[in-house]
Amino acid sequence: MILNKAGDRPRFLRYFFRGRPGKAAQPGLVPCLLLLLCMSPQPLLADDVKGTIQYRQNYMGAIGGHTGALRRLKDGRFTAEGHLGMHAEALVKLTKDITLLFPEGTLEGKTDAKAEIWEDWADFEARANESQQAAQALLDAVQSGDAGVIDTRFGELAQTCKACHKPFRK
Ligand code: HEC
């Protein structure tokens, strides 16, 4: 924009461009500040997204591992002192932080996560809470030592995995 007289600019433009008559106007402080404002907060960098997705898949794989191991133990396929409790305790801890693994902006790349997670976050959170409560109930059953109750609580926990995977995982 070439300015002939200082007064040529409409008032609001004076906030955006400053310049001397006859010279091209320079962007002023206001557009620079606006640009900075638009750039923050920084979106997750591509590397961070990849790392987050890989970590959550490892983490979910660990949940799957403990659940599968617990199934073998409760079905009597293997016996080892304290192992039922060990896996149940791990599941209580792991299911507590499921929602931490899904920060917004981690949908691109090699992931089975669905966009619905962030569109319906309250429901996703509720599914995670149910899983956590079911894991706690399973741990309580393991500590009581009643095989029938352990079996029932295990089935209930497995249902909570499905209840989240069905709507939120590809
Ligand atoms: C609140 C939702 C939620 C709950 C509860 C949940 N999952 Fe998941 N799970 C997911 C999502 C979403 C993915 C896909 C993650 C991705 O690919 O980025 C996943 C992925 C997995 C995977 C694949 C990991 C990989 O290597 O890609 C396994 C195994 C798994 N879950 C097991 C379980 C088990 C077992 C339970 C129950 C004890 C459970 N999950 C409970 C949401 C959940």
Image (tube, rainbow, N blue to C red):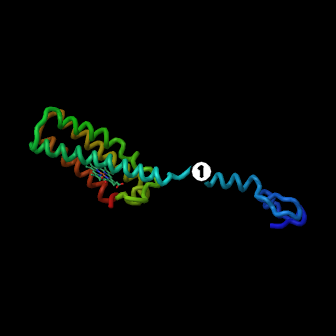
Q: Residue at 81% across / 61% down in the picture?
A: 25
Q: Which residue is mark 1?
A: 40
Disc 1 marks a residue whose amino acid type is Ser
Number of labelled discs?
1
**Relative depth, front residue between 160 and 114:** 114
| Residue at the farthest front position | 47
Residue 36 image position (x, y, % from top left) = 65, 52
Label 1 sits on a secondary structure element that is loop
Q: Is residue 125 above or below residue 140?
A: below
Residue 129 in which image quadrant = top left
| Residue 2 picture location, percent across and down | 83, 67
**Residue drawn at the location 48% of the way across and 54% of the way down:** 46
Give the position of the N terminus as an image quadrant: bottom right
Is the residue 75 above or below the residue 19 in the image?
Answer: above
Q: 130 or 6: nearer the eye?
A: 6
In the image, taking residue 139 as reference, residue 35 lies left or right, namely right
Q: Residues within 10 Å of mark 1 (few under 14, many from 20)?
A: few
x, y percentage for residue 157?
23, 47
Residue drawn at (29%, 42%) of the image: 133
| 18 left or right of 98 in image | right
Q: Is mark 1 within 8 Å of ligand 1?
A: no
Rendering coords of residue 23 (x, y %): 85, 63
Q: Residue at x 23, y 52 (%)?
A: 159
Point out the image quarter for the C terminus.
Answer: bottom left
